[in-house]
Amino acid sequence: VLGDDRFWPSLLRTGIWTFVSVAGEYALGLISAIALAQPIPGRTIFRALIIIPWVIPIVVAGLTWTWMLTPDYGVINLWLIKVGLLSKPYYWLGNLDSALLTVSFVNIWRSFPFYTLSLLAALMAVPRDILESAAMDGAGAFRRFIYITMPHLRAVSLTLILIHVIWTAINFDFIWVMTQGGPLNSSETLPIMIYRFSFEDFDVGAASALAMMMMGLMLATFFIYWYGAARPSDEDAAW
Amino acid sequence: MVKSGFDRALRTGATYATLCVLAAFCVFPFLWMLDTALKPAGEVRSVNPTFWIATPTLENFRHVISDANFLLYFRNSVVVAGGSTLLALTVSVFCGYALSRFPRQPLSRAVGGALLLSQMIPSVLLLAPLYILMRNLGLLSTFRALILVYCTFSIPLCCFMLKSFFDTIPLELEDAAEMDGCSRPKFIYRILLPLSAPGILATGLFCFVTAWNEFLFGYVLINNDARRPLTPAIMVFKGPHLTDWGALMAASVLAVVPVALFFVYLQRFLVDGLTTGAVKG
């Protein structure tokens, strides 16, 4: 498998796909959680609306976006042209440069509500009195956020990111539904490769070898997290 | 905190603006799916798409249900998701009980660890082994295969969810019941289950939704069209080249409806569950 010239590009793409997705999901999740934590009327409605993508089956989400992104009749292209951002329809899923990123974008769309819920729960648990005393001491909203809120979110964030790095790296459905790894393998990640090995080449040995390597990668991630998470808790104890 | 009126107004405005943008981002594809499903073919392929439907029609739904047999796929999904939910719940009630009541026993620690580990094994990795296993058992293209496979990932999840629900039921209740001569199985069945009914329902629904949304195994393990669950059926229905988007979106709506209904009920448990988890640390 290592000698296969599709392996390294595929590994690299898995990395890009995972990194872009998780970073985007975390950023959106954090923004939406902060917005939802503000005491304003109507936030339960917004909360319900924001969770919607997470409930929709991946296949349905993937196909709906594929439909919206089709070059000839897709809404997104036609509206972007109307607004003047594009001069002609762009085949988002059919271009070598954009296919993987487009699928990542859709993955972000579907997964970030989970971050919102978890981060929101953690935000609600940040003690108000610390925030207030900091405000009293003259810390601005931004500094309060960096020095008080963020450290409180650290444990939740680490766990979220770890789980999602694993879930994203192994995700097969999205890529398969939207591009099937194409065009020209430009969105082929390791899970897609495993699938191709076992059900198109019928080379179960290679598929299993690849699967074991992925498993190793996952375990490595897990241990990095383990040691990464152990340290902050020591600091917390000292503090 | 003391704030000037202007500051507060600015902040509220910014919050609403962010929320509105995000909500639109989240809801738009969903609405567009509904919208497309209700459009006649001519309007679906318009170069000037709008939300406005000149002549709304149920033609797409009719086509999907009567010509493409989506009711059958729908039923298959119900059978598979329901079956795996029942099986997973039955196993997990006992497992969750043991995990909750004897957390320090070496055996339950080992089982808990194994369950946690199994959560981390990605399903794609199990694809080839499970396929071969099912072939050797002669279960390919049967509902039983899917039910068993779905249980591999729903049982760990259910065990942990149920464990945390059982944890909230005080030990004193169990002592009191035992004092009155109630055996353990009887306690589970007479006291524990009724008390944690909402939790069990939530776990079951969660499990059902996970199985309902699952795509990969349904796609690979079922080759018989009559047994195909809904999500792979949608993918197969798409076809390689020419796609009838109106009908496809109608099928998608069918797939989303039950999930959406369950979710209305589930939502409060999701938020509660995550919150209690966060507080307990």
Image (tube, grey):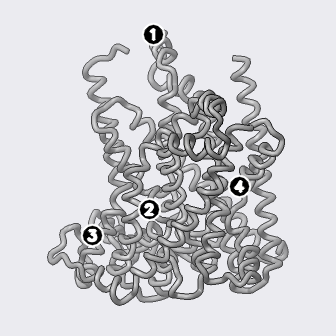
Query: From the viewer's perspective, is the residue at label 3 or at label 1 nearer?
Result: 3
Q: Earlier in the sequence, mark 1 or mark 2?
A: 2
Q: Where residue A110 sits: x, y (%)?
A: 48, 58
**Residue at the spot x=36%, y=63% of the render?**
B29
Q: Residue furthest top?
A: A137
Q: Where residue B169 sits: x, y (%)?
A: 57, 34
Q: Mark 2 falls within which chain?
A: A
Query: From the viewer's perspective, is the residue at label 1 or at label 2 nearer?
Result: 2
Q: Which residue is mark 1?
A: A136
Q: Which residue is mark 4?
A: B120
Q: Which residue is mark 3?
A: B35
**Residue at the spot x=62%, y=75% of the render?**
B144
**Residue at the spot x=57%, y=74% of the render?**
A176
SS category of the residue bearing label 4:
helix
How crowded pointer 3 is (Cα within 10 Å; few <14, some 14-19, many 20+) is rated as some
Q: Which residue is mark 2?
A: A56
Q: Residue furthest left?
A: B54
